[in-house]
Image: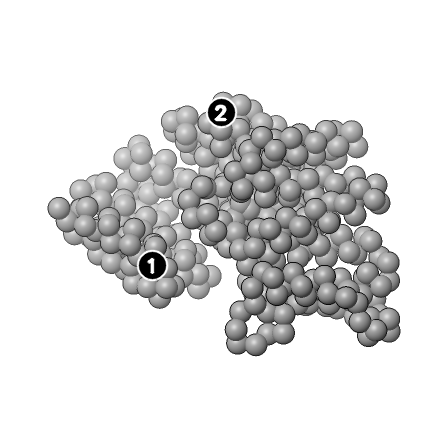
């Protein structure tokens, strides 16, 4: 978040939220599920574990079985946890990561513990447990400092800054991102500079400093190209496009979002594809280039259906409805709102359902 859209920072190995996604004050908890975003029981019975259950699992006393379980076993558990995290089953991921962490503690492998805390924090974000996510990030950062692992500190600080930003602690987030940028500059970490500058741009965007955000994002894009971080580059380009959109700079908005979309298409990065399409739809709609907006929305719906992502399909229908509403075609707009409402009900999202019903009421008056 990004992701973390959700909310979000990203890195290849260390980042909490896969892309330092734009953070929206709306839907407080959903930022940690999405998105958000926003990205993070124990014994997997049909009931869902709460935060306390999982935290107890993470910090439970070591058992004797750890003494004979091997590093290979810990590494296997870590891989299984990553698979569960990628498949959006963070509750199961926490169980695997907790077992792996228990073994790494016994082995005294601080580096592996740091990586595991990283993954745990991402799991907690997806579960919607911000306090547990922050605790895991702080532990990961402490380990990086103990090991004088400067790269780990850079990404740990960016993750911490992202969580602080999600909590609305903007000033504290700025200080943390500044520290990360300082370390990145001291060790000449191109990747770290790109990430930290992108997050500093995000903070300034949140504060309404759009011109400053543009400058920071442009610097970040340059470093991300140098580090050949294609996903990071697309992510920052999407942020830059959003800043240009806020400045009502149509030409730069379209050029920037289009560049992000090309990269996302080439890497099959679905998150950044959808973000770029949404930005382009907003830009073309504001300029009343409706035909282009409809083409993009058709592509967006196909992607959402391919992913079998009900949430994104709902958003596609809502976008269609809003576009038809702006064009004055209220009957078609109502039809798409109704389709979106049906999906909201299938997701048992009563809040979203009420918002959509309110929109139908508005255009029916």
Q: Residue at x 54, y 42 (%)?
A: 167
Q: Nearer the viewer, residue 46 or 74?
A: 46
Judge left or right: residue 222 versus residue 271.
Answer: right
Label 1 CA crowd tier, 10 Å (few <14, some 14–19, many 20+):
few
Label 2 residue SS: loop
Residue 78, quarter of the rendered image = bottom right
Q: Which image quarter holds the N terminus?
A: top right
Q: Are marks 2 and 1 in contact (CB under 8 Å)?
A: no
Residue 327 drawn at (x, y percent): 21, 41
Residue 227 drawn at (x, y percent): 69, 38
Residue found at the very far bottom of the displayed protein:
45
The correct choice, above or below, for 1 with respect to 343 in the image is above
Residue found at the very far left of the displayed protein:
365
Which residue has dot 2 on it?
A: 209
Which residue has dot 1 on it?
A: 350
Judge left or right: residue 121 versus residue 143.
Answer: left
Residue 62, quarter of the rendered image = bottom right
Q: Residue at x 63, y 48 (%)?
A: 134
Mark 2 and mark 1: Cα distance apart in space: 35 Å
Residue 53, visible in the rendered structure = yes
Q: Residue at x 68, y 65 (%)?
A: 57
Q: Nearer the viewer, residue 196 or 336?
A: 196
Query: What count of labels does the image hold?
Result: 2
Q: Nearer the viewer, residue 183 or 216?
A: 183
């Amino acid at each position: 978040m990004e992701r973390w859209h959700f909310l979000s920072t990203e890195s290849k190995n260390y980042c909490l939220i896969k892309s330092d996604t734009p953070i929206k004050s709306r839907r407080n908890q959903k930022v940690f599920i999405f998105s958000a975003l926003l990205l993070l029981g124990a014994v997997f019975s049909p009931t869902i574990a709460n935060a306390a259950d999982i935290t107890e699992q993470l910090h439970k006393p070591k058992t004797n079985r750890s003494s004979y379980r091997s590093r290979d076993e810990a590494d296997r558990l870590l891989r299984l946890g990553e698979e569960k995290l990628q498949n959006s089953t963070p509750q199961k991921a926490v169980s695997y990561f907790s077992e792996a962490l228990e073994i790494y503690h016994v082995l005294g492998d601080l580096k592996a513990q740091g990586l595991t805390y990283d993954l745990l924090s991402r799991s907690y974000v997806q579960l919607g447990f911000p306090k547990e996510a922050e605790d895991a990030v702080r532990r990961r950062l402490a380990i990086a400092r103990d090991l004088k692992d400067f790269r780990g500190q850079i990404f740990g600080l960016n993750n911490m800054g992202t969580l602080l930003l999600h909590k609305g602690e903007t000033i504290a987030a700025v200080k943390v991102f500044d520290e990360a940028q300082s370390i990145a500059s001291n060790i000449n970490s191109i990747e770290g500079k790109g990430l930290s500058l992108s997050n500093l741009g995000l903070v300034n965007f949140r504060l309404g400093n759009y011109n400053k955000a543009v400058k920071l994002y442009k610097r970040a894009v340059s470093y991300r190209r140098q580090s050949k971080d294609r996903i990071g580059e697309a992510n920052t380009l999407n942020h830059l496009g959003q800043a240009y959109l806020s400045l009502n700079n149509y030409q730069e908005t379209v050029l920037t979002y289009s560049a992000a979309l090309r990269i996302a298409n080439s890497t099959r990065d679905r998150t950044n594809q959808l973000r770029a399409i949404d930005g382009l739809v907003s830009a073309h709609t504001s300029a009343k280039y409706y035909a282009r907006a409809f083409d993009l929305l058709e592509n967006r719906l196909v992607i959402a259906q391919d992913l079998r992502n009900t949430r994104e399909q709902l958003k596609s229908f809502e976008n269609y409805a809003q576009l038809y509403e702006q064009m004055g075609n209220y009957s078609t707009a109502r039809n798409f709102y109704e389709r979106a409402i049906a999906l909201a009900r299938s997701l048992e999202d009563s809040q979203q359902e009420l918002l959509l019903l309110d929109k139908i009421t508005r255009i029916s008056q």
